[in-house]
Amino acid sequence: DAKTTQPTSMDCAEGRAANLPCNHSTISGNEYVYWYRQIHSQGPQYIIHGLKNNETNEMASLIITEDRKSSTLILPHATLRDTAVYYCIVRPRGGGADGLTFGKGTHLIIQP
Amino acid sequence: NAGVTQTPKFRVLKTGQSMTLLCAQDMNHEYMYWYRQDPGMGLRLIHYSVGEGTTAKGEVPDGYNVSRLKKQNFLLGLESAAPSQTSVYFCASSYEGELFFGSGTQLSVL
């Protein structure tokens, strides 16, 4: 079973910030939070990951609470092309099979 | 640098037929994975490999076999296809936890 809980769907107006929450209350000390998105029927695409500090890259920002039990992915200026299913997973940084279950994610719909 | 390439992209099988899906990666990654995704569902792990010559079962391995004879290739086989195996199949490889996915194979079993 996935170790994370996400809302099924969210709407956001184009040009506004999209804030996608994820609960991971059972996260272990060596597990990172990873975010991916899947546009239409394409393969999932990596967005960002973090351990305990907030992270930012050209695509998004990741805010992780101090107790690490939840996080928020922020798309600062959402566009129509950001409409996708967003997955939050927690797993160790290594390459094994831990944490590789993707739940149903959050279907983010950007409204014009 | 093509990343992760899956072939074929589409396939229609009759019940009982066999086929092999090929996944190739050119990033020299040790870890490779096969997932299936059914409509409205997340991705479920079928089998995975942590290196050349090694494979392991994931969440939903029944009805599938895999082989990793070369580091760059990970094959997924269906020996006797069933309608329940109609799905979209994704291959991925990983480096330091980050997964790189192929574009998927849409398989229909009639």
Image (cartoon, rainbow, N blue to C red):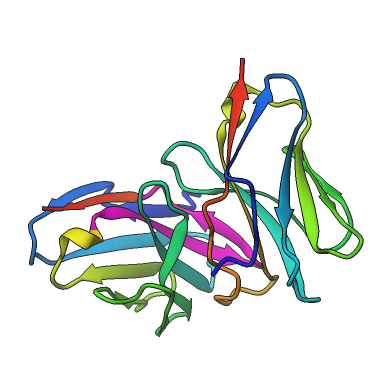
The reply, left or right, for residue B89 in relation to residue A37 is: left
Q: Is residue B92 above or below residue A27?
A: above
Residue B94 belongs to the span the image colors magenta: yes
Name the residue rendered at 78%, 53% in the picture. Answer: A71
Residue A44 belongs to the span the image colors magenta: no
Q: Is residue A47 above or below residue A108?
A: below
Q: Nearer the viewer, residue A40 or B105?
A: A40
Q: Is residue A41 above or below residue A48?
A: above
Residue B59 position in % (x across, y down): 43, 74
Q: Quadrant of residue B15?
A: bottom left
Q: Is residue A44 above or below residue A19?
A: below
x then y, percent, for residue B47: 40, 74
User: Magenta: predominant secondary structure element?
Assistant: strand
A45 and A112: which is toward the camera: A112
Residue found at x 50% / y 37%:
A39
Magenta span covers which residues? Answer: B86-104
Image x and y of residue B1, in percent: 50, 49
Residue occupying the far right of the picture:
A66
**Quadrant position of residue B76:** bottom left
Q: Residue at x 7, y 67 (%)?
A: B16
Q: Is residue B43 left or right of residue A21?
A: left
Q: Residue at x 54, y 56 (%)?
A: B100
Image quadrant assignment for residue A91: bottom right
Question: Among all residues in the image, which is located at the extreme top?
Answer: A112
Query: Does residue A49 appear left or right of residue A81 in this picture?
Result: right
